[in-house]
Amino acid sequence: MNGVHDMGGLQDMGPVRIEKNEPVFHERWEGRVYAMTRALRFWNKWNIDSSRWATELIPPVEYLRMSYYEKWHAGMVELLVNSKLVTREEIESGKPADGSAKATPPLTAGQVVPLFTQAQFAGRNRTGASPRFRAGQRVRARNMHPLGHNRLPRYARGRFGIIDRDHGAFSLPDTNATLLGENPQHVYSVRFTARELWGEQAPAQDAVYIDMWDTYLEPA
Amino acid sequence: MDATRRDFLVAGAAAAGAAATPNMGHAQEQEHGHAHQAVPDDMTLRVKSLESLLVEKGLVDRAALDTLVDTFEHKLGPRNGAKIVARAWVDPAYKKRLLADADAAIAELGFGGQQGEKMVVLENTPKVRNLVVCTLCSCYPWAVLGLPPVWYKSAPYRSRAVIDPRGVLRELGTELPAGVEVRVWDSTADLRYLVLPERPAGTEKLSEAQLAELVTRDAMIGVANVLPPREGGHA
């Protein structure tokens, strides 16, 4: 979906301001939102791609107004309701519906540290897909505008680049976000020159590298 | 961008926000220069209410939430990444392994993944400068840098890093020579990027631990240089 989340190349968003000695969370509620979001994932009712998609579905004016963890909160509420873990009435009242059964949380305190600091990397690296492209090959990012979740930034669509390297296979967000399947595909770093993306005023030697799933590309 | 117009827009937005929600919990933030927007203080109440609902329904365990917050506030953070960088500076064989297979080399130091991510380390040299951004959301190497700062997740950085990286760096205090090649890495997939900054001159006598003290979060994202001790004031 061509949404406001796809920000690469906008020029009117103001200066970048680094806050000195920034705390991890500015308010207590931000940490609670973060922790609830991570803990709820253990119900396996959704995945990282559905979480991103839920955030992208926040109406554009709200998306731009909300702080980062407000967006996480809004996305989490939608996922909770859509997956039927809670009802909107329960969210409004803050109380479980009469007669609802009590579940057992899938994540306990003792599991947190090993799971969040010692897990394996590349856990989503899938087998079974074969690459259509190889390092050094010239490719073109497809000019695609799907209405669902998609991770091909608008500023790169239709542009020519060179495959820098193949990182192996990963779930395709386009289908995984709506639980239509992981459809593992190879993901490549693709090098686009700054001039190919932004025109003649860009420095000749500069480049942007973008991670691209196999189906986002066509031979060129 | 005309500064007058921006001031006008910011003033207008603040006025509109204040009118709509007189009870602003973050009114003081504008003075502190935080990049994030004003938030009605009812977020505290809404989140409290949601947490007690989820706990009562047995969907989350409150102690697990406490441990999660503690882990991200105290156990994961840029000090982990700094140790990786310092090791790569003092041990050429480690650096070689880190650039070839970052996941395995980072695991050697006891740091692990959490999102099924694959780590990639990008080496800065006198000729090549790397910069990491996620234009679509906020992808960031949590395992080695902790949670991203507000500016990294902000619209100004996400929008401009890809089209004007030199301008962003200049604004943040680093002027790059014209001949240097800038490589911006837009983190759109499950690859997580860590920049290996250049080791500053004059640090030959420092220990690995002292070197790690010099390495900042911003240097590992690619928006700052690592400064030698006399300039940085560390170590």
Image (tube, helix red, strand yellow):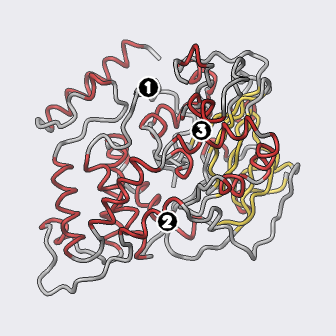
Residue B16 placed where, x, y %? 20, 31
What is the number of the mark on residue B82? 3
User: Mark 3, mark 1: which one is toward the viewer?
Assistant: 3
Q: Specify the quadrant of the image occupied by residue A175.
A: bottom right
* Residue displayed at 62% across by 52% down: A152
Chain letter of the residue carrying label 1: A
* Residue displayed at 61% across by 65% down: A120
Residue A175 drawn above or below residue A104: above
Residue B8 placed where, x, y %? 30, 18
Q: Secondary structure at mark 3?
A: helix
Residue B113 drawn above or below residue B222: below
B121 relative position to A88: left or right? right
Which of marks 1 and 2 precedes in the sequence? 1
> Which residue in the protein does label 1 denote?
A17
Residue A131 placed where, x, y %? 81, 65
Q: Is disc 1 surrounded by few (<14), some (14 to 19) or many (20+) residues within 10 Å?
A: some
In the image, are marks 3 and 1 on the same chain?
A: no
Q: How many marks?
A: 3
Q: Secondary structure at mark 2?
A: helix
> Which residue in the protein does label 2 denote?
A114
